[in-house]
Image (tube, rainbow, N blue to C red):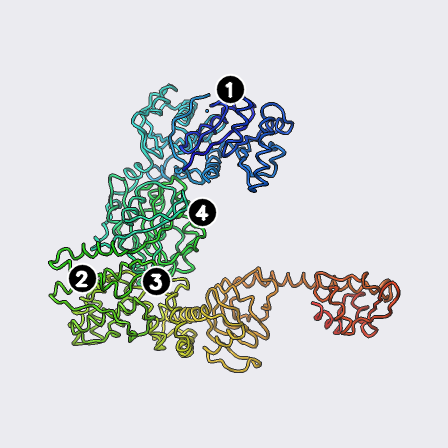
Amino acid sequence: METIKVFISYSWDSPEHQAWVKKVADTLEEIDEITVVWDGYDLDSLVDKNYFMEAGIHDADYVLVVATAKYKDKADDRTNGVGLETFLSTAVHWKAMLQDKRSKLIVLHREAHSIPRYLEGHFYIDFTDNAQFPRRIGELLALLRGRATAERPKKRGSLAAFTEGSYDFTRVEELIQVNHPNRRALVNGSQGTDFSGANRVKYELWETKSPALGYFLALHASGTIKHSAQHAARQLLKGGLRPSDITVLRPRVARPEQELIARSFAEAGLSTRIHECTYKDYIWDYCIDASLKYIDPPNPIENYTNQALTYISNETGEPVRVDSALDHIVDVLQKPSKVAAHLIVAPGGMGKTSLCLSAAKRLHFREDLRASVILIQAESIKKYVAERGLAQSRIETIYDIYELYAKYQGHGKLFERSTFDLAVVCGNLTVIIDGLDELTSLFQERFDVGGFLESLKHLHDQLGSSNVLLTTRNNVVAEGTGLEALAIARYELLGFDSESCRRYVSRRLAGFASSGTMVDKVMNQIAKIRIRDDEGRIIPFLADISTTVVEDELREGKTDDFEVSDDLTPYHSNNDLTDHIVYSILRREKTRHDLGISETEVVDVISDLVIDFGKRWTVVQMFERLNILYEARAHSIASKLELNPLLVRKGSEIELRYSFLSSYFEVLIMLRGLMNTSLEKGACRAFSRLNPDSEEAQELKRFFRANLSDVEKALAAIVPKLRDQAISEPSSKLTKSDIEVAKGAVAGLLHLYFAIQKLPIQDTTEKLLSFFNLNGSEASPRTLAGLFIKGAFPTLDFSNLIVTQSRFHSYRNLMACRFSRTKFMYSTFEDCADLAIKNTQLEPSMIDITCDPGDLREAFVVTQATKAGEKAMIHAEISRFFHSFFRGDRFIENRRQFIKFSNKVPGLAADKFDRLLAAGYFLHTKAKTVADFYEVAPQFRQSVRKFLSDGYPDAQLKRFFAEVR
C-alpha cells in the first residue's frame, strides 16, 4: 500500500490541546502506511513557516482540520498562521470540490460551534467526547485507508490491522463472575476511561472474595498499559488498598522485556506482585472444565479432496486465489483477524463437509493455541429435530445452535451460555457450522439469519479474536448485501482443475501396481462425461466417485468400464449430470452384484431412509426396512447394497458417502410423492418443512418448469387429498402432527408452483381454485376450504369466495388482494398485516368471529382511521369546490379561473371539469368578453345546498362523490 501523507492544521489553544493534537499525530504516525506532517515533528525556528504550511497543504493526501472555537475565529478572520492555512486550504478545498466533487480536508470536531465558515456543512468526525477517542480514531483510519521536531515514534502497527471501529471488551464482569460470584467493581468501565489531553486510559479494577480477597486489573486494547496502570495504582491508594497480589488480564501477551505494570505500581509506592495473563489464557486455564476441552475429535477424512478457493481481498478489492483451501482456512482460524465469520459458499458435491471435518481435525485440542474446536453439522441437528421435534427451539445466537448439537451428540456436560460466549470471544473455541442453509430450511421463521450473523459480529467486536467458519450451498446473505457490514469474509471453493485432479487421483491410486494406467482411465472418463463447469473446473464429488469405482474394480480384479449414461432416469428427476451419474452407478451396481431389485427400488429405499434418519442410519434399521419389502431376500439385498459407492459402512452404521446426497434424495422422494399423487408421510413431511429459498426448492422449481403440464395434473390430484387431511379432526389413524404436516405440504406445493408463474391476478386465482376443484362461475359465491398460504405469494382475487378452515402465515400480500362479497370463516391469520397498504379492500366485516385475525386487528384500526381521514378530506375539498358557486344563501355563476379546483381529489382537478359538464352537474351559462362563466345545474342545486348547509350527501351527491374520487 502506498504511503499516505497527512497534514495537521490546528491552533495553539492551550498546552492540554497541544498534547491532544500530539496524541492524534503519534497515533497516526505509528501506522506504517502513514506519514504525518505536523509542526511538532517538522517545524523549528530555522524553517520557513509559510513554505512549510503551503507545501504541507498542497502536497498532503489529506488535511486534518482540528476545529476549536479559537481556530474558527482565526480561520474566519484570516488571522495568524491559522488564517494563512485557511487561505491556502480554501483554494485547495473548492478546487477539488468543483473538479472531483470531493475534498481532501477532514474536520476533527473538538468543540461545539467551532467549524470554520467555509467548511460548514462539510463532513466531520466528532472528537468532542474524550471517552470515544479510540472509536473516532478508528473512523479516521477507515477514511485514510481509502488512499515530524519531536522524535517520531517507533512503528508499531499497520493500517491493515485496524477495523472500522476499535474493539471494546464489555464483558469483564461476566468473565470474573465465572469463578467469583462475590465481587465488586473498584473502578468500573466508565470510571476507568480517560482520553482527555494526552491520556489514553482504559481499564477496570475488581475485588473478589473467595473468601480471601483477590484483585483483578482488566486492561483494554484502546488504552496504553502505562497510563492505565498508573491510574489504577492511584485509585488503589486512594481507596486505602495495598494488595499483595493482583491478576492483570490483558488482550495481548506482554513482551518479555516489558515490566510496565510492575514498574508503574512500584513508582506509586505499591509492592504488589503482578500476575499477568491474557484473556484467552485465563479462560482456557481457569474457566473451561477439562472435559469440555477434550471433546472427541471428528472422524478422520479418507482421501480428502483438497482444492483451491478464492475470495475478495479487503485491501485491494481484487480476487485472490489460494491453492489449498484447507491450509488457508486452518490458518485464518488460528489467529485474530478483522473477520467475524468466514463463509464458504459452494454447491453440493464440492467438498464443504470434507473441508470442515479436515479443518476440525487439525484444530482439535491445540494446547499450543490454548484452544479447541467445536464442529456442528446441520445434518445431526436435522436428525435430532426429526426424533424430538422442533418444540420451541429458536435460533438467535451461535450458542442456540451449539446447545441443540450438544444435546444430539449426548454430551454429558455442556458449556454454560456465558462461558461459551466468552470462550468464543477470546478465541478459545473455534466454531465450525457446516450447512447453514440446511438450518434455515429446517427452522425457517424460527431462524433469524440476519440477527444470527449480527450476533457473531457483536461477539467479534469485543476483542477481535473470535473464529467462526460457516458453510452454505446458497448465499444465505443476499449476494453482495450486508457481508462487509457484518465483517463476514466470503469464500468460493473452486473444485479441481485438470492438474490438481490428476494429482488427487494419482494419490488415491498410488498403492496399486497399475496405478498409472488407472489414473489415465479415470481422467479420460472425467473428460468423456463432461463433468466440468463453465470455467473448466471439475466437481470433487464426480472426481471422487469415478476414482472410487476404479478402486473397487482393482480390489475385485475386474476391469469393467464405468460409463455414464445420458438415458432418462426411470424415476422422476431433473435428468441433469448428477442424476445421470447416480443412475449410472445404480445400474452398474445392479449388474455387478446381481442386486435383484431395480434402480428405482434402490432410490426408493435410500430416499425413505434419508427422510427418516438423515444421512446416517444403522445396519439394523436398513435391514428392517428391506425385510418389510423383500422378506427372505432382505439379507442378500442388504449385504450387496452396503457395497454401493454412494454409501459407506462405518461399524454398525451406514451413511451417505457425500453429504449433499441427503438433500438430493429428499428431492427425489418429494418428486415421487407429488408425481404419484401419494400422501406418503416422508414426502409430505419434506414438502411441509421446505424452505422456499433452499437448494432443494430450486431443484424442485427446475422440475416444475420442465414438466409444467404434468405437474399441474399432479397438483390437481394431490392438493384436494392433502386439503381433506389438513381439515380433518384428529383420530387414531390421523394425529395432530399429521394434520399440521398436511397443512404445511399444501402451503409448500402452492408456493413452489406459483413461484415459477408470472400470471395476472385473475389467472392466478382461477389456477389456484382449479387445484381445489373449484371451476364454477365467479359470479356466484363459491366455498374454498383448506387454503394454506405461507410467506411470499402472489395477490389473489377473493371476490365471491367463502374461505373456511384456512391459514395464512406471513402472507404480506393479503391486504393488497381484491375483496368483494368475501367472507372468511374458521381461519387463522398470522403476521399478515402490512401497514404500508392504506387502501385495502379487506374489511373487518369480512372476517367472521370464528376467525383469529392476528395482527390484522391493528391493520384494521390503521386503515379505518386512514379511510375516515380520507373521507373527511374529500368532504372538505368538495365543499370548498362547491363554494365557488355558492355565496351567502344563493348560487352564483363563476369564471373557470376562480373555481377552487382540487389537487387532492382526482375528479376535481381543473383538467377534469369538462367531464363534470358533460355529466350534467354544471352548465356553461354565457360567454362574455372577459371569460366563460359556469354555474351549478338547476336539478343538482337542491343536493348541493343540503350538503353545504348540514353536511348531508343525498343519493345524487353520493353518485357525484363516486365519480370524482
> What distance separates the C-alpha of mark 3 from that of mark 1?
79 Å
Q: Dividing the image into 4 quarters, which one contains the N terminus? A: top left
**Is mark 2 in CB contact (under 8 Å) with mark 4?**
no
Q: Residue at x 29, y 56 (%)?
A: 495
Query: Foreground residue, 238 or 830?
Result: 830
Give the image quarter of residue 937: bottom right
- In this rendering, position of residue 319 left or right of residue 72: left
> What distance separates the C-alpha of mark 2 from that of mark 4?
46 Å
Query: Foreground residue, 612 or 921?
Result: 921
Where residue 774 sits in the image (x, y, percent)?
49, 80
Q: Residue at x 58, y 72 (%)?
A: 819
Residue pointed to by mark 4: 485
Instruction: Give the structural element (helix, strand or loop) at label 1.
Output: loop
Q: Is residue 267 above or below residue 797?
A: above
Q: Amino acid at mark 1?
A: Val
Query: Foreground residue, 622 or 693?
Result: 693
Residue pointed to by mark 1: 47
Bin the neighbour count of mark 2 within 10 Å (Cα to Cα): few under 14, some 14-19, many 20 and up. few
Instruction: Give the structural element (helix, strand or loop) at label 4.
Output: loop
Q: Is residue 850 above or below residue 3?
A: below
**Is mark 4 in CB contact (under 8 Å) with mark 1?**
no
Q: Amino acid at mark 3?
A: Gly
Where residue 482 sits in the image (x, y, percent)?
45, 50
User: Which residue appears farthest toward the right when viewing the image?
Assistant: 929
> What distance separates the C-alpha of mark 4 from that of mark 3?
35 Å
Q: Which mark is residue 162?
A: none
Residue pointed to by mark 2: 652
Of labels 4 and 1, earlier in sequence is 1
> What distance separates the C-alpha of mark 3 from that of mark 2?
25 Å
